[in-house]
Image: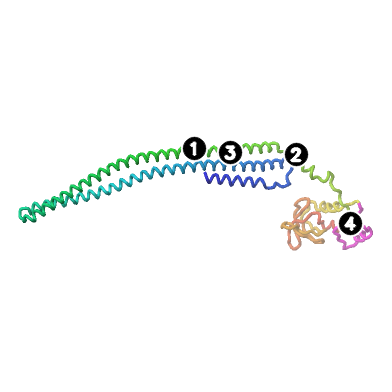
Amino acid sequence: MKQKAHIEETYGKALVRLAKLPLGNQELGKTRLSLEAMRTNAEREGFAHLEGAVKITEELAKFTAFIEAQRATRKQVEETMKKWQANKKNLYKKSMDAKKLYDNRCKEADLSETEFDLKKTSAQQKDINKLQQKKLKCIHLAHQADDQYKTAIVALESTRSNWEKETEIGLTALQHLDRERLAFIRNVSWVHVNIGSLNCIQIDDLNEDVRIVLEKFDYEQDIQVFIQSEQTGTMRPEKVLYEPSCTKTAMRRAAAPDYDSTVPVLDSEEASIDNQLYESVEALGGDTGQTYRVLFDYAASAGQEEEMSIKDGEILEVLAQVDVNWCTARKPDGTTGLVPSNYIKKVEAVLHDRF
């Protein structure tokens, strides 16, 4: 229970900290409301776990007080039983010592009597009197040892009887304490499980609130909210047209034999660069295995290993048309890669345009 309370408290605090993290400004509309509901739910769920940890700690305090009270009662019962056990053990030792002394006194009395019987007919009267006094003394000591032994046995039996009664009373009390302890553990466990069940019900109710918000979620509406708030216009930008500043110079460059401009020469100011570029795409078409000439420099994009860099004036062999914008070409040195279709033209088409 102590570990469970610690885990619940740690988890609850983590959820509360999580709920305080910023959501950012990326989402709008119902999406943001859903995220706000989830964050609020995380905070409430964290408080629910903290409340559960407090309840478990309270039950743990009751259990600890109960165990301490039982420990005191058990100690008192055990001390009483140990006291009678010590008395019985002490009297038993005294009884065995008295029995040993009694046995020795009896042996001495028997020996003195035997010695007196053997020497009373042959010894002098003086010696006979000594032997008789010795025999009487040994018999007296034997009677005293016998009385002491009997007294010790009586005391031992009385103590043993009392010890047996007190032991029975003590064991009954200990058995009763164990019954109380097991019943208390059962009740505390029952309350502990109920706390967990109530916590789960509370958390499920909180999750139901989030589900209600998610049922009203409409991502199409959020997309329209984003468009309305972030749009820059409803019309596409117009094409940027080439505007020559010196028509005569441009005409002279177009008439030169070695002219190779990166910008196609326009017949009029209304023509656009796009029209000239798309002419190269149409000229390429689906013809592969033909010789083409590079019109403009192109550097392969970083990280695009399949692309190939080309320079104005290079001669290529087109191997395959990938799509309308890209084709696979090969240089005279054998280098192969993707090149933009609007950057090349057939050799015949190039010569025809220029001459």
Q: Please tell me in which quadrant of the rendered image residue 291 appears.
A: bottom right
Q: Position of residue 65 (x, y in %)?
A: 49, 42
Mark found first going from the N terminus, 3 or 1: 1
Q: Does residue 249 show up magenta in the picture?
A: yes
Which of pointers 1 and 4 indicates the residue nearer the eye?
1
Tag 2 and tag 1, C-beta contact below 8 Å: no
User: Would you name the residue on which mark 3 appears?
Assistant: 200
Q: Nearer the viewer, mark 3 or mark 1?
A: 1
Q: Earlier in the sequence, mark 3 or mark 2?
A: 3
Q: Which residue corresponds to mark 4?
A: 265
**In front here: 294 or 50?**
50
**Which segment is the magenta one?**
244-269
Label 3 amino acid? Cys
Q: Residue at x 67, y 43 (%)?
A: 39
Q: Nearer the viewer, residue 245 or 15?
A: 15
Q: Position of residue 151 (x, y in %)?
A: 24, 44
Residue 344: x and y, percent?
81, 56
Amino acid bearing label 2: Gln
Tell me which residue sits at (27%, 43%) in the image: 155
Instruction: Classify mark 1: residues with Cα within 10 Å, few (<14), some (14-19) or many (20+).
Output: few
Circle 1 sits in a helix, a strand or a loop, which is it?
A: helix
User: Which of the two discs, 2 and 1, labels the residue nearer the N terminus?
Assistant: 1
Work out how far the residue at label 3 is from the one at label 4, CA to CA, in angstroms.
Answer: 77 Å
The residue wearing badge 2 is: 221
Q: Residues within 10 Å of mark 2 (few under 14, many from 20)?
A: some
- Amino acid type at circle 1 is Asn
**Which label is found at residue 187?**
1
User: How far separated are the C-alphas under marks 2 and 4?
Assistant: 49 Å
Residue at left 60%, top 37%? Answer: 202
Whole-angstrom CA distance, mark 3 to mark 1, is: 20 Å
Contact, mark 3 vs mark 2 (Cβ under 8 Å): no
